[in-house]
Image (cartoon, coloured by chain):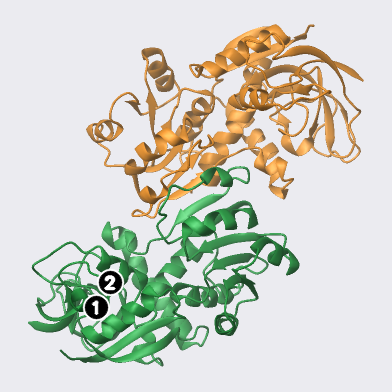
Chain colours: A orange, B green
Amino acid sequence: MQAKAVGLYQGLPISDPASLQDVTIAVAQPTGRDVLVAVAATSVNPIDTKQRQVQAETDTPRVLGFDAVGKVLAVGDQVTSVMVDDVVYYAGAVNRPGSDAEYQLVDERLVALAPQKWSAAQSAGVPLTALTAWEALFEKLPLKADRQANLGQTVLIINGAGGVGSIAIQLAKWAGLTVITTAGKPATIDWVKQLGADVVLDYHADLDQQLQAAGYSGVDHAIIFHSTDLYLPLVTPLVKPLGTIVAVVTNQQPLPMDLLKAKSLNFAWEFMFTKANYQLPAMATQGMILARVAALANQGFIKPTTKRVIEGINATNLKTAHQLVESGQMLGKVVLTAPFNA
Amino acid sequence: MQAKAVGLYQGLPISDPASLQDVTIAVAQPTGRDVLVAVAATSVNPIDTKQRQVQAETDTPRVLGFDAVGKVLAVGDQVTSVMVDDVVYYAGAVNRPGSDAEYQLVDERLVALAPQKWSAAQSAGVPLTALTAWEALFEKLPLKADRQANLGQTVLIINGAGGVGSIAIQLAKWAGLTVITTAGKPATIDWVKQLGADVVLDYHADLDQQLQAAGYSGVDHAIIFHSTDLYLPLVTPLVKPLGTIVAVVTNQQPLPMDLLKAKSLNFAWEFMFTKANYQLPAMATQGMILARVAALANQGFIKPTTKRVIEGINATNLKTAHQLVESGQMLGKVVLTAPFNA
């Protein structure tokens, strides 16, 4: 079948009219464990802008978009976990056509039923960030994924106001952690406090001094959701011996890992597409994580992080969303909602 | 009381006669949780030679030695786990006077009863390396510290023939792992096979090709007991997604951590003095680990790694031992045994 979509033929600056274009793509009927989804909303993450920038020239348009909610139209012959007409949400896989398209194929193991009480715009902002935050907290850090299960432990979250940070703060609070995060502007500080942050450090000033002044000699765990190059040396002195630092942003220069040795610290990469890219058995955990996150949304433990909704999925609107994400100043998430129009 | 010892007043090349000197030091009676030990044997590790090289000038001689076995002569008023006349073994703490001395004070939480059937020369070769290997395997890697508890999992041990590698291979085999290690010379290859290594890769040739030829698509876990700068880029392609690489040798240059990201790998420092240096509650685990290692020795699950014994603890003999360790060609461990002579 044919589907309206937004795609690109080569990596170009977002200011270039050809950087994202309205296109039509072919989408096959689902086979095996794939399901076919009619996308109702899609969200933009930093991986979209990075992938766009480095896209090699291609004759077939590359479709980005790694966050979606939509209705299941058809299922492959091996699908056992979702049915036609289910409303599902998912991040999908970075090595397959993305969710900036009217119809999309996605492996059932990567999807879950969307939060029941949330709008499409609210649900579409969640999957990629929630998977990243959940895996960072409960797979990379030695924390328990249960309500109030980690009382007395502290986690430092660098850049709590961004897309991933906004959901990470909430998941950490649900799990009983004391959350210390960084923010710079009044609106940003307000936002992370609304999300539950216990202590907010101004990233313009000395982090260690502020932490001590707040009554903490150090933190048990740390997650860096911003420049790893910039923050690893700043965060290392704050983490208690034997602790772990999780990072999500690829370093641009080699890292001074020797700084971590005296305290026998651990460094962990969190990249949520690893499981699907390598087709690991663990890829099925992503559907399970999204199901648990939906339950937390339904129960009111987490609230939507979508801060900006743009109606209409097309090249013009997607460029606006990419620009917002590239600015690095986005609070929470930006989402585009159907209809698709060319 | 006075004790014969070997010490230094400044960092000098081992070829300098003043690099290690016969000295007399004062040792206090034990208080608190300290015990006073009459050292029967001491061993040399890479940390001795590194600490010697960088020693700042001092009026009081610095005594190295972070591996000992000996008899308890007296205990502090808070000691509850060992008694006078117990034969104990320990690595001790790097920020206190070491075991290259007739008498030494050590915190009871860092000691355990020595293996019953082993000689002093055999027991003294074990503590520092066993603590490093045990913490790397069972605290830094997600492995269970029980017999045959990790069947079907593979660990790559870089430099299996050295001091730490020699005990790590044995502990890994006891725990049920398939052990893949590196060695270069016939004698070294023989030694790691005697210790139980399942697959030996020649470090002069391509590791990945040899691993594939041996029937392994990759390894679940890796421990680098040699240059981290050299081996991190070589080991990273061999480790399966979501796996962990443990390192013990401080990097000399910043490390290309971006290589680890696509597979969401973890990097963990193992430095066995962290617990004592920071006086962590976890320091008591070191006495417990040594007790378990002694039990494994008594049961025959591990055999001694001491390969060279030098009789007489004095400056001349200690220089010989430092030279052996600095050569980087030592199989297993070198141990000096009492008496102390000046």
Using the image, name the chain to which the residue with label 2 belongs: B
Are marks 1 and 2 in one subunit?
Answer: yes
| Figure quadrant of the C terminus of chain A | top right
Q: Amino acid at mark 2?
A: Gly
Q: Is residue A135 left or right of residue B316?
A: right
State the image coordinates of residue B224 (x, y, percent, origin top left): 51, 63
* Residue A156 appearing in the image: no
Q: Classify mark 2: residues with Cα within 10 Å, few (<14), some (14-19) or many (20+).
A: many
Q: Depth check: give the residue in front, B320 or A22.
A: B320
Which residue is pictured at 68% across the width and 59% down the height?
Answer: B218
SS under mark 2: loop
Which residue is pictured at 30% across the width and 75% down the height?
Answer: B111
Residue tagged by mark 1? B99
Whole-Å distance between the Cαs marked 1 and 2?
8 Å
SS under mark 1: loop
Toward which corner of the image does residue B21 lie, by quadrant? bottom left
* Residue B58 appearing in the image: yes
Q: Judge whether A274 appears above or below A193 on screen.
A: below
Q: Is residue A1 left or right of residue A100?
A: right
State the image coordinates of residue B252 (x, y, percent, origin top left): 40, 54
Q: Judge whether A266 appears above or below A91 on screen.
A: below
Q: Confirm or deny contact between disc 1 and disc 2 (CB under 8 A).
A: yes
Q: Amino acid at mark 1?
A: Ser
Of marks 1 and 2, the one in the foreground:
1
Q: Judge whether B87 appears above or below B204 on screen.
A: below
Q: Judge whether A166 appears above or below B139 on screen.
A: above
Which circle marks residue B92 in the picture?
2
Which residue is pictured at 34% across the width and 78% down the height?
Answer: B323
Which circle marks residue A221 in the picture?
none
